[in-house]
Each structure stands twice: as structure tokens, then as C-alpha cells.
Amino acid sequence: MNLPNRAPLQLQLSEDQVTAFLHDAFPAEVRAKLGTVDMLSLNHLRMRLDPDESMLRSGGIVSGPTLMGLVDVAAYAIIAAHHGPEAMAVTNALNINFLRSCKFQTIFADARLLKLGRRLATVDVCIWQDSEDELIAQSTVGYALP
């Protein structure tokens, strides 16, 4: 059986356009807590988050909910970059594995598309700080597309 040819994956938005899309999609008062787009290339988006005191939990480490929020925004951003600025995409699954504690310093989230279909997208997101080889967390995120 011959399957129809699928168009090759390509960026629909630039890094600046993804940043503008995120600013429009989220309320102004929470934008600083969501991180910023640090880098965008085909099938790869890096978010950067400089945590503030409100993101800490006891023990002086960054909280799990903060990391989950960063994962979700990174997945949302890479889907927008490749699918286009569709604000109605919604998370339908998020699985995260916390591998080590997250220090109170700059956090990076690398998002990579595993699949971008017509109705569903799946993204792998890895969180790290000092070295990409020592992950803080790894997550698989599913999105339903309108």
C-alpha cells in the first residue's frame, strides 16, 4: 500500500514570532514565570528560565510544578513553531520523570518534536542546568491540535 507523501517538517514561525505568540497566549502577569525562547531550529526549541524566590520549595530547590510549567510551555512553543500560531492547541498528556534536584539557577528546557500529526503532537522535553548530559528531568508531552 502506498501512503501519500507527507510534506517535510519545516518551521512556520521564527524565534521572534514564537516569542510574540507566547506573549499573546499568556497573561502578562505570568509571562516572566514561563521562561523565554533561547534558541529555535528545525525540530528543536530551547527555553530558558531564571527562577525567582516564588519558585522555590523547602530545601532551596526549584519546585516540581515550576518545572512542569516550563516543560508544557516549551512543548507548546515548539508545536507553534512548526504547526503555526494556533492558540487552541491543548495539552492532553504530560509524563515527567524527575531525575535529580533542580538548583536555584538558570534552567534550560530542550524540546524536540517526536511526531506532529494533523490532530495530535508528541514532544520530548529535557530539562538541564550545568550540563546537557546531566538531566534534571525528562518529559513526554502530548498535545491535541484543533
Image: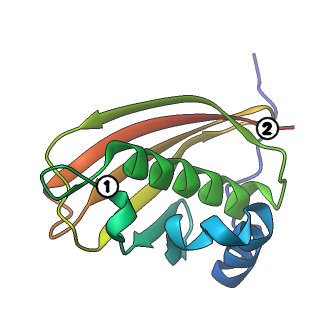
**Residue at image location 63% in from the left, 79% down from the top:** 15
Return the disc, 2 or 1, that comes first in the chain's sequence. 1
- Residue 43 vs 139, above or below: the answer is below
Q: What residue type is labelled 1?
A: Ile
**Residue at image location 80% in from the left, 69% down from the top:** 24
Position of residue 22 in the picture relative to residue 51 (left or right) = right
Q: Quadrant location of the N terminus?
A: top right
Mark in the foreground, 2 or 1? 1
Whole-percent x and y of residue 70?
Answer: 47, 55
**Residue 41, picture quadrant:** bottom right
Along the line of sight, which residue is nearer the eye, 145 or 105? 105
**Residue at image location 74% in from the left, 65% down from the top:** 27
**Residue at image location 71% in from the left, 72% down from the top:** 28
* Residue on which disc 2 sits: 145
Residue 125 visible in the picture: no
- Residue 120 vs 77, above or below: the answer is above
In three-dimensional space, the C-alpha distance between marks 2 and 1, rounded to whole angstroms, equals 24 Å
The numbered mark at residue 127 is: 1
Q: Quadrant location of the C terminus?
A: top right
**Residue 81, picture quadrant:** bottom right
* Label 1 SS: strand
* Label 2 SS: loop
